[in-house]
């Protein structure tokens, strides 16, 4: 009998560790399957004879799926439970990865859309799960999973091209390799399927007095994430073109592009201790978003320091993303509110993310210069800073 408490404690600790590992594994699937396409995009274009607009649609399609599917994720979780819905989301990602292996341009697009749907559901529900199970460690867990996303996507982007060239394996095998992480995630997450599968009690006692869309604070958080994503995806899409036009070699531009993605993950290490101490994040949000705006103009007017601007821009946009995700939990009173706010903010956010590269590309075509797109990024950064100032205040939806 004396050993029972120790046994329960040990079991509980193991279950908690398994949950954390599961969350980080899910996070590892939330960027790499679609950002990994960029290094082998030329091979895909040549293989299927795609036009430039069709090729661009491959990178935009997941973002459109994010915008469409995100609002549905919360209601799906209410019916099926967070754990089962997250399992379904990862299974969708696996099906999408498998679809792209077929030698069919139609399956390439269908698979990419399915990946986007799976990522959208998981994107929305992870903050809600963290709010429920790690209420006292929201900043730590959010930083950890964003760090995992960044490192995995940057690492896979670096590996996918060499893997496609290895002994003639090709781009389909290279992209399909990400399924190893996805299958591992499904196996580990199976341990969660019998836990908390019903909506939490707060689902019936949520204290929101009106629609989430009618709260000013919800819009401030949504636009913080949305404007940051708008800027971030313009840079992800067009940074190599911006750098080569400024005089960098294609090799340097590719290396800087990889460095940018890795830099977005670094804030996870810095913000973990900082967010734990700060109750009000207004000044931090304002400074970081303003730094993004400054770096965009730095790329335009001082291109000789391109590596510095690229790294700082990656750091500041990654930090704003972590702050925005943290605010979804910190500015809500229960996991149901967090799921609703997450669906709203990620739906609008990824809609802006999908629009950004297209608008920037159109501006470049119309003007023959990257000046207008980079100024657009700077304006987005300033507006993001304003939203960050208001959404960083220590309050919640009910008290705003």
Image (cartoon, helix red, strand yellow):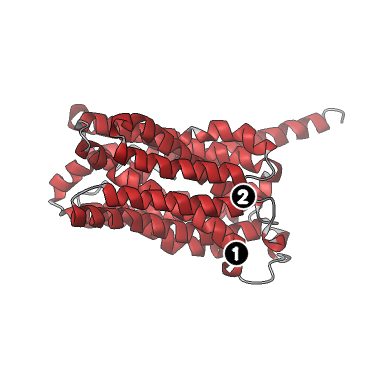
User: In the depicted view, which residue is nearer to us: 42 or 251?
Assistant: 251
- The answer to which quarter of the image holds residue 18 is top right
Point out residue 125 in the picture as x, y percentages from the top left corner: 55, 53
- Residue drawn where x is 21% and y is 48% of the image: 369
Query: Is residue 279 shown left or right of residue 219?
Result: right
Query: In the figure, 234 relative to 266: above or below?
Result: below
CA gap between label 2 and label 1 equals: 13 Å
| Quadrant of the frame with the C terminus | bottom right
User: What residue occupies the far bottom of the structure in this picture?
Assistant: 210
In the picture of the structure, the residue carrying the numbered disc 1 is: 216
In the picture of the structure, the residue carrying the numbered disc 2 is: 392
Point out residue 302 in the picture as x, y percentages from the top left corner: 31, 35
- The answer to which quarter of the image holds residue 44 is top left
Query: Is residue 148 shown left or right of residue 55?
Result: right
First along the sequence among labels 2 and 1: 1
- Residue drawn where x is 41% and y is 38% of the image: 313
Q: Secondary structure at mark 2?
A: loop
Query: In the figure, 293 relative to 346: above or below?
Result: above
Question: Does the rendering let one see residue 22?
Answer: no
Dots 2, 1 in contact, CB < 8 A: no
Q: Residues within 10 Å of mark 2 (few under 14, many from 20)?
A: many
Point out residue 87 in the picture as x, y percentages from the top left corner: 51, 50
Query: In the figure, 183 relative to 306: above or below?
Result: below
- The answer to which quarter of the image holds residue 365 is bottom left
User: In the depicted view, which residue is nearer to us: 141 or 321?
Assistant: 321
- Residue drawn where x is 26% and y is 33% of the image: 253
């Amino acid at each position: 009998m004396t050993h029972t408490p120790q046994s329960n404690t040990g079991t509980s600790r193991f279950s908690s560790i398994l949950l954390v590992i599961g969350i980080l594994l899910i996070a590892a699937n939330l960027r790499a399957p679609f950002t990994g396409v960029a290094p082998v995009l030329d091979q895909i274009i040549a293989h299927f004879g795609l036009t430039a607009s069709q090729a661009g649609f491959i990178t935009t399609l997941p973002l459109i799926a994010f915008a469409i599917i995100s609002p549905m994720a919360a209601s799906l979780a209410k019916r099926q439970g967070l754990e089962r819905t997250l399992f379904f989301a990862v299974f969708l990602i696996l099906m999408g990865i498998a679809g792209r292996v077929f030698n069919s341009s139609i399956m390439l697009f269908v698979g990419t859309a399915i990946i986007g749907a799976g990522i959208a559901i998981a994107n929305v529900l992870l903050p809600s799960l963290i709010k429920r199970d790690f209420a006292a460690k929201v900043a730590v867990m959010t930083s950890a999973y964003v760090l995992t996303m960044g490192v995995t996507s940057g690492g896979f982007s670096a590996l996918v091209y060499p893997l496609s060239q290895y002994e003639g394996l090709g781009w389909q095998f290279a992209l399909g390799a990400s399924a190893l992480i996805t299958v591992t995630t499904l196996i580990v997450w199976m341990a969660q399927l019998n836990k908390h599968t019903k909506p939490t009690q707060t689902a019936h006692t949520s204290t929101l007095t009106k629609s989430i869309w009618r709260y000013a604070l919800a819009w401030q958080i949504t636009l913080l994430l949305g404007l940051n994503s708008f800027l971030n995806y313009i840079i992800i899409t067009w940074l190599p073109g911006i750098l080569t036009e400024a005089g960098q070699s294609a090799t340097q531009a590719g290396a800087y592009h990889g460095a940018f993605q890795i830099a977005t993950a670094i804030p996870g290490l810095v913000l973990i201790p900082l967010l734990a101490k700060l109750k009000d994040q207004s000044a931090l949000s304002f400074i970081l978003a303003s730094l993004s705006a400054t770096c965009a103009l730095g790329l335009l007017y001082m291109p000789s320091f391109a590596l510095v601007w690229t790294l700082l821009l990656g750091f500041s946009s990654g930090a704003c993303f972590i702050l925005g995700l943290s605010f979804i939990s910190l500015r809500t009173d229960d996991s149901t509110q967090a799921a609703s706010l997450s669906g709203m903010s990620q739906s609008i956010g990824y809609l802006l993310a999908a629009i950004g590269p297209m608008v920037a590309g159109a501006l470049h075509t119309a003007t023959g210069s990257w000046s207008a797109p980079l100024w657009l990024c700077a304006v987005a950064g300033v507006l993001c800073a304003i939203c960050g100032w208001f959404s960083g205040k220590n309050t919640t939806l009910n008290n705003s």
